[in-house]
Amino acid sequence: MLRLEIAALYCGVNVLLLLVLAYLVTQGRRTHKITLGDGGHEGMSRAIRAHANAAEYIPAALVGLVVLSLFEALPVWVLHAGGISLTLGRILHAWGLHTGPFNAGRMFGMILTWIAYALIGGGLIWAGLAQ
């Protein structure tokens, strides 16, 4: 598997995750007949936050993964470690938000997301300085 194909894999999965989270918000709006905001429904508020939080973190990480994939000197494991951490972290965090306000899914999801950011950001700095 080529580096850009690795990045494409994680980009695709995370874009689909955003789609699923957007669908859950739309489904909640239709069910509760809410056109704007959360209508005072806690579950709706959690669905909105799960989508918004993923939309805040995923794009920058995916841009970073694609740029990292362009550097041949970078070990492939960095791409996989960043992609897996991001993807698993975002899934856990979204699941955690849907199941309740405070739980292990949310906590571990954020930790994995921050690990992904550290790997991707560190890899980008290394790649930029190593040339």
Image: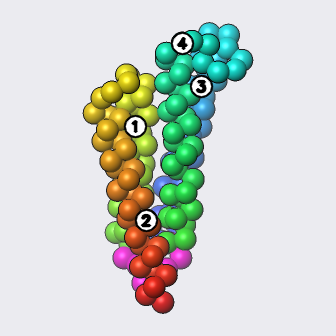
Choose between 1 and 89: the one closer to the eye: 89
SS category of the residue bearing label 3: helix
Q: Which mark is residue 25?
A: 3
Residue under label 2, please give it.
120
Q: Is residue 84 visible?
A: no
**Image height of 110 relative to 23, above or below:** below
Residue under label 4, please give it.
41
Which mark sits nearer the N-terminus, 4 or 3?
A: 3
SS category of the residue bearing label 4: loop
Which mark sits nearer the N-terminus, 1 or 2?
A: 1
> The residue under label 4 is which amino acid type?
His
- Residue at image position (38%, 64%) is 119
Q: Which residues are magenta?
A: 69-75
Choose between 119 and 73: the one closer to the eye: 119
> The residue under label 1 is which amino acid type?
His
Q: Mark 2: give few (<14), some (14-19) or many (20+) Cα within 10 Å.
A: many
Question: Could you tell me how far apart the alpha carbons at marks 4 and 3 are, in whole angstroms?
Answer: 12 Å
Q: Mark 4: give few (<14), some (14-19) or many (20+) Cα within 10 Å.
A: few
Question: Could you tell me how far apart the alpha carbons at marks 4 and 2 are, in whole angstroms?
Answer: 36 Å
Residue under label 1, please give it.
93
**Image height of 114 relative to 18, above or below:** below
Which mark sits nearer the N-terminus, 3 or 1?
A: 3
Question: Could you tell me how far apart the alpha carbons at marks 1 and 2 are, in whole angstroms?
Answer: 19 Å
